[in-house]
Structures are given as C-alpha cells and as structure tokens.
Image: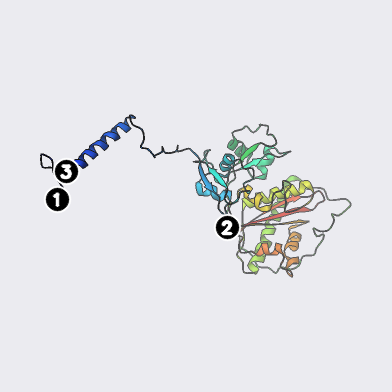
C-alpha cells in the first residue's frame, strides 16, 4: 500500500512524521518531569490522600451504615460535619467523609456525646458500659479531668454482642396477677427501702434474664426465632431507664427530646430496624403482663414488638423509681 512521497533515504513520509512526533513527545515529558514545563492544559493535580471525601445521603441511610461503608467512625463524620445527633441526617444531605480513621483502634460505632448538666466521666462511662480509662484514652484526657456542659466526647462503643441464644424451655404462658399497672397512680404510704448496691445489681440482672426468658418463650410458642442479647441495645435501654427514673415519669421521648431510634443509633447499634417497649412495674413478670398478656385480645403494639420476626436482638434497661417500682425499657434491633 503506497505511503505517499518519501524522503531522500527512501523512508515513507508518514513514518518520518510519526517519528518526529514521538521524539517531540519524549522531549516534552522530560521537561515536565524536570519541572520546566507545567501540566497539560485541562488536567488537575490529584487531591491529597488525607483530604475528605463527599457523600450524598440516600433514603434509608444511617450514619453508622455510612461509617461502616467508608471504614471510618461515626464520631469522625460527626466532628467533620458538626453533627450533634447521629440519628438526624436526611436524604440528599452532603456529608464530608474523613479519608481514614483518626485514632488508633478506632471503630465504626464510635460516636460523639455532648456533655449534659450533672454529667461526670464515670457516669458517662457507666451509661455506655465502658471503663473510665477507655473513655479518657479515646479523648486524650486524664481520668481526673473536669468536663464541661456542651463539651463533645468520643464514645468508643464496641460492636453489639452476639452471644448464642440460650435454650428456651417451653412452658405455658399464663396470665399474671396484676398488682399495680403503669397507668395507676403510685402507691402512697411507706415504701420499701432500697436494697444494698450489690443486691440491687444482682436483682436487676435477674430481671433482665427473666424478661429475655419470657420474651423468647412467647416467640417460640408463636413460631418466631428467639432473640439474642445485645450489649449495645442494653446500653441504650439502660440510659433511657435511668433518664425516666431521674425525672420521675416514663415515655418513649427522652429528656433531651430524643426518640428510641435516635438513642439506639447514638449508642452505636448498626441495625436499621429498631423498636422500644417501656413500663413502670414492680417486677419483670408484671411488665411482661402489661406488654404481652393484656394485649393478646387487641394484638397491641407492645405484643407485636415482642413477636416481630424483623427483630433479632434485644437489650433491657432497668432503673429503680423512687416509689419502689422499676422503669423497664426493652430496645429491639434487627
């Protein structure tokens, strides 16, 4: 195939032109490498490796889910975007995502907590089931440090515990004799003295075990898989139970205006399906009667929470009220 007119040495003109272009390109690249020439027009330098990225929130997203997807912590996203509550994000919102974890051993569930009036480091650590040393190390402060209202603290929440569900013994679920439903006014007259701290802690743990037993008996009896215990859900439930006990009345709304889903997300639970039951009762059995036995005819919302196959885990919070009753909170997740 003819190439056109050649040069004196008989090399086709097209090949000569290509060789000249190649030599010119090599020379230009050498000059650019030496810093004599700049980058070609229209190109941009790569962004620094530690620069934040941007993510547009999608419907159904949670801050913890986003943190897990980018392998960073909730706390780092909150700090970068000035977010006080990890539960309050909306579809279409633009979030800056840190390039990498900001602390050694940082986990995705780590979140930020805003110090409230009356808070202490030990109280905050207890609320989130942490050691004070874990809390202070995550924040780079001493255990003797003074914290102030409004201060932001990183909460190094661990992932949800996944213990194997205990074997459930099927026994008949019989109505329990009511003593004082939550809707009734608290009793008047002398009330029993609070038990010693060790006895009280043992009593609370026994009540938690009893509630898990009753819940799983009901679920298995209705063909639903048993619930596993979650330490993170328990931490969220316990914080709300203590809040209800401190103010003297119960509700699904916290003293800070938070809802159950927000408190559960704030505690670091990764699931997107959550729910809550609460009661003011003298015992675990009485609370279960309120939530389950009394709602059998109407298939009420508390019963439906207990039997919902969407939920895979549960955690119970229990705090003693001033009148000898207990605030019992059940937080569900799936």
Q: Residue at the location (65% across, 65% down)?
A: 307
Q: CA distance from mark 2 to mark 1?
A: 80 Å
Q: Residue at the location (82% across, 48% down)?
A: 193
Q: Nearer the viewer, residue 196 or 10?
A: 10
Q: Nearer the viewer, mark 3 or mark 2?
A: 3
Q: Would residue 211 appear left or right of 322 to someone viewing this image?
A: left
Q: Nearer the viewer, residue 257 or 245?
A: 257
Q: Residues within 10 Å of mark 3 (few under 14, many from 20)?
A: few
Q: Is residue 198 above or below residue 271?
A: above
Image x and y of residue 320, in percent: 76, 50
The residue positioned farthest toward the front in the image shown: 5
The quarter of the picture where the C terminus appears is bottom right
Q: Would residue 29 appear left or right of 54 to someone viewing this image?
A: left
Q: Would residue 320 appear left or right of 162 to someone viewing this image?
A: right
Image x and y of residue 104, in percent: 52, 38
Q: Is residue 199 visible?
A: no
The residue positioned farthest toward the right in the image shown: 189
Q: Give the labeled residue for mark 3.
A: 13
Q: Give the labeled residue for mark 2.
A: 164
Q: Residues within 10 Å of mark 2 (few under 14, many from 20)?
A: few
Classify mark 2: helix, strand or loop.
Answer: loop
Q: Give the labeled residue for mark 1.
A: 2
Between discs 1 and 3, the one toward the N terminus: 1
Q: Is residue 252 above or below residue 145?
A: below
Q: Quadrant of residue 45?
A: top left
Q: Are marks 1 and 3 in contact (CB under 8 Å)?
A: no
Image x and y of residue 302, in percent: 71, 62
Between discs 2 and 1, the one toward the N terminus: 1
Q: CA distance from mark 1 to mark 3?
A: 10 Å
Q: Quadrant of residue 131?
A: top right
């Amino acid at each position: 195939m003819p190439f056109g007119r050649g040069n004196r040495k008989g090399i086709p003109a097209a090949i000569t032109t290509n060789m000249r272009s190649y030599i010119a390109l090599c020379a230009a690249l050498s000059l650019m490498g030496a810093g004599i020439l700049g980058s070609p027009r229209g190109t941009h330098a790569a962004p620094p490796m530690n620069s934040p990225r941007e993510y547009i929130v999608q419907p159904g997203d949670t801050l913890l889910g986003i943190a897990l997807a980018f392998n960073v912590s909730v706390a780092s996203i909150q700090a970068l975007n000035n977010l006080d509550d990890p539960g309050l994000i909306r579809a279409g919102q633009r979030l800056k995502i840190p390039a990498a974890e900001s602390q050694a051993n940082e986990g995705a569930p780590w979140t930020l907590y805003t110090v409230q009036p009356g808070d202490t480091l030990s109280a905050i650590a207890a609320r989130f089931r942490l050691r004070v040393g874990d809390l202070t190390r995550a924040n780079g402060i001493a255990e003797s440090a003074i914290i102030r209202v409004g201060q932001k603290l990183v909460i190094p929440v661990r992932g949800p515990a996944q213990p194997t569900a205990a074997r459930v013994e099927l026994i008949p679920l019989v109505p329990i004799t009511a003593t004082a439903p939550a809707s009734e006014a608290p009793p008047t007259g002398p009330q029993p003295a609070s038990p010693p701290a060790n006895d009280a802690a043992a009593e609370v743990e026994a009540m938690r075990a009893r509630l898990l037993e009753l819940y799983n008996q009901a679920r298995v009896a209705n063909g639903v898989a048993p619930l596993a215990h979650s330490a993170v859900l328990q931490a969220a439930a316990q914080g709300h139970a203590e809040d209800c006990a401190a103010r003297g009345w119960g509700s699904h709304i916290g003293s800070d205006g938070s809802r159950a889903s927000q408190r559960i997300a704030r505690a670091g639970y990764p699931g997107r399906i959550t729910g809550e039951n609460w009661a003011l009762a003298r015992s675990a059995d009485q609370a279960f009667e309120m939530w389950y036995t009394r709602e059998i005819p109407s298939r009420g919302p508390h019963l439906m929470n207990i039997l919902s196959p969407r939920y895979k885990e549960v955690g119970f919070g229990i705090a003693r009220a001033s009148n000898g009753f207990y605030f019992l909170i059940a937080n569900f997740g799936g």
